[in-house]
Image: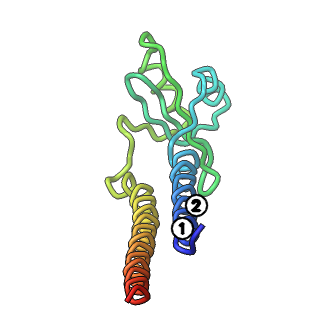
């Protein structure tokens, strides 16, 4: 194996490592991000009866709620049956002093923020990888030209 092949393998290997790290970052962002944890509807009823809900969003197909305050906030999402009575649920939540929203209270910035960081990291890693491969390719071309020139000089 020539020196240039070994260098190419090393650059490609480094690029693959950085790409793998970026994929892990993206997946960790999805898993640990702001997405609520999917739970059964019975857990919502338990939290409702215990009075641990601090905020709730009632949708036609699901209920999203949070428990805790400050850094201890945990968000949950439960699918709901179509025949569930919104009025009874809303009345019970209101009696507990829970803030009820009809739509999630996420601004555009809050929605895009995790994706922008991920995109910036991926862009930086892919840009660096492309730069390294291009640099290696240019060096390999120069070495090949020099080798051909050197062989031509020896033949003379």
How many residues crowd around disc 1 within 10 Å: few (fewer than 14), some, or many (20 or more)? Answer: few
Q: How many marks?
A: 2
Q: Residue 121: x, y in percent?
A: 46, 64
Q: Residue 9: x, y in percent?
A: 56, 64
Q: Residue 80: x, y in percent?
A: 48, 19
Foreground: disc 1 or disc 2? 1
Name the residue: 45% across, 59% down: 118
Quarter containing the C terminus? bottom left
Q: Which residue is mark 2?
A: 17
Q: Residue 152: x, y in percent?
A: 37, 84
* Residue 153 in the figure: left or right of residue 49: left
Residue 100's place in the image compared with 73, above or below, is above
Residue 13's place in the image compared with 137, above or below, is above
Name the residue: 46% across, 66% down: 125
Quarter containing the N terminus? bottom right
Element marked by disc 1: helix
The numbered dot on residue 103 is: none
Question: Which residue is most to the top?
Answer: 83
Q: Are marks 1 and 2 in contact (CB under 8 Å)?
A: no
* Residue 62 in the figure: left or right of residue 1: left
* Residue in the foreground of this view, choosing between 45 and 80: 80
Residue 64's place in the image compared with 40, above or below, is below
Q: Which residue is mark 1?
A: 5
Residues under labels 1 and 2: Cα distance?
18 Å
Question: Which residue is most to the left?
Answer: 108
Nearer the N terminus, badge 1 or badge 2?
Answer: 1
* Residue in the foreground of this view, choosing between 84 and 93: 84
């Amino acid at each position: 194996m020539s020196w240039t092949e070994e260098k190419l393998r090393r650059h490609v290997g480094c690029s693959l490592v950085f790409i793998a790290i970026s994929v892990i970052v993206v997946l960790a962002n999805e898993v640990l991000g702001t997405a609520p944890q999917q739970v059964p509807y019975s857990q919502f009823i338990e939290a409702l009866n215990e009075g641990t809900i601090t905020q709730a969003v009632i949708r036609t197909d699901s209920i999203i709620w949070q428990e805790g305050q400050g850094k201890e906030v945990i968000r949950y999402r439960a699918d709901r049956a179509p025949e569930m009575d919104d009025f009874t649920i809303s009345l019970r939540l209101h009696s507990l002093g829970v803030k009820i929203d009809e739509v999630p209270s996420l601004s555009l910035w809050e929605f895009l923020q995790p994706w922008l960081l991920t995109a910036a990291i991926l862009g930086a890693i892919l840009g660096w990888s492309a730069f390294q491969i291009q640099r290696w390719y240019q060096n390999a071309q120069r070495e090949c030209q020099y080798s051909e020139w050197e062989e031509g000089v020896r033949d003379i």
